[in-house]
Amino acid sequence: MLRRAYHAVHDRLQASSVMNLTAHRERRSDRTGGHPVAANAEDHLVAAIEWLVRAQDATLDGGVSRGYSVAWHPYFRIRGWQPAYPETTGYLIPTMYDAACRLDRPDLRERAVRMADWELQVQLPSGAVQSGVIGEQLVPAPAVFNTGQVLFGLVRAHMETGRDEYLSGARRAADYMVRAQGADGNFEHGRSAVARDDCTTYYTRAAWALCVFGTYVQERRYTDAAERNVRFGLAQQLDNGWFRANCLSDPDRPLLHTIAYAVEGILGCGLLLRREEYVAAARKTAVALARQQRPDGGLSGRFARDWSAQASWDCLTGDAQMAAVWWHIGGTTGDADLQARAHRMCRFLMRTQNRAAPDPGLAGGIKGSFPIDGDYGRYEVLNWPTKFFVDALLLTNPTPPASVPGHAAAVQ
């Protein structure tokens, strides 16, 4: 008992900013307002892309590191770069292609191809994508949500290269997802082992990937499966736009990240299939969240069912996702206020980005939380908020025109 208590205290101390000067300084900077915002948003875009480049190079296998532990990480038991993460590497592929086009950087296209090749290498025999990071499980467990996020990347890789192996891998992933679906539209199988398996409303974002694939190959069985899941998700939506059963850990106070996932999936399918009722449902939630936006542009990291803020920190992934959601809905419905809010959110996110840090794992990336010691990804810089930040900047600074993952597949 004494040994367990000692290790618990030791781990908490090691994971705190007390033991790491970089973490301490970043916490202090965050709590005093953040970092300078450049006159040109492209400076922030390039810094984020360079962080993603370093995250890919850190793994040596083509996948992208899950993130960087600024302080010692109690789960991975390291400080520094973490293992490659199949789920988020998958939906980084469209982001890298979009950035390559915007910045005229062929090297980013090459990196997207390496990511897609790696995804095929680690795809499970069932067509599924594993949960968690590489090396985390002795026998990798299939995860239907993760499979959907990689499906976005494989479709885009096929669009860009025409290579048959990407389309074949995408079909295997989509077929696995259809097999995992129950009669009510919910995904009954392949639920993540690291999240509550009774809270799957946000899986609509995986359904969106099925919709993208079905539209791309012009096969209704995939779009029909996507719509079944969207209808399941809409059944969880309250009149005020809040969703039940929609969090990794606390469905009474869901993360903004999973709220945004649910909205993205419903909106993405609505735009692809021209379902006005889906777009209207997504707008209901988007407008409810817009009312909660703070004067500084950010949002609380968690919300109760009455939309009261439940966290003193921001979940930066959710912030960046909502910037893109607001932009798309504003453009679709002619709501200039939502697009103005997207700009305000992007400016807030730019303030959270430390572009001048001497630590290459911190410089240019987007943290899990703001301040950095918030409850989501504490003392971590993560690849998925960085991805969504890039997407949001590409959208809200559309010269030349940019797209977000999934929508490019729909257009083409």
Image (cartoon, helix red, strand yellow):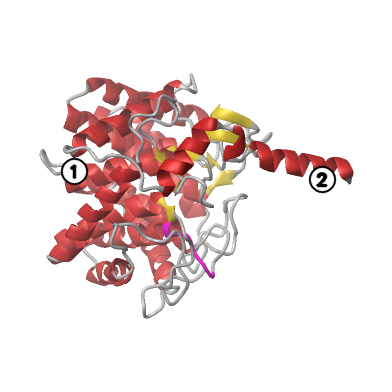
Q: Nearer the viewer, mark 1 or mark 2?
A: 2
Q: Residue 64, how many percent across, how many down?
A: 45, 30
Residue at the spot of label 1: 412
Q: Is residue 21 above or below residue 204?
A: above
The reply to whether residue 20 is in sight is yes
The magenta span reads: 252-256
Does residue 254 belong to the magenta stretch?
A: yes
Q: Answer with the quarter of the image where residue 52 lies.
A: top left
- Residue at 35 percent across and 32 percent down: it is 364
Q: Residue 194, how many percent across, how many down?
A: 61, 50
Amino acid carrying label 2: it is Ala
Does residue 390 belong to the magenta stretch?
A: no
Chief SS of the magenta region: loop
Residue at the spot of label 2: 5
Q: Answer with the quarter of the image where residue 205 lies.
A: bottom left
Q: Residue 125, how many percent across, how many down?
A: 55, 35
Q: Is residue 388 left or right of residue 175?
A: left
Q: Is residue 104 above or below residue 1?
A: above
- Residue at 57 percent across and 32 percent down: it is 20
Q: Residues within 10 Å of mark 2 (few under 14, many from 20)?
A: few
Q: Nearer the viewer, residue 239 or 153?
A: 239
Q: CA distance from mark 1 to mark 2?
A: 58 Å
Q: Nearer the viewer, residue 248 or 213?
A: 248
Q: Is residue 307 left or right of residue 249?
A: left
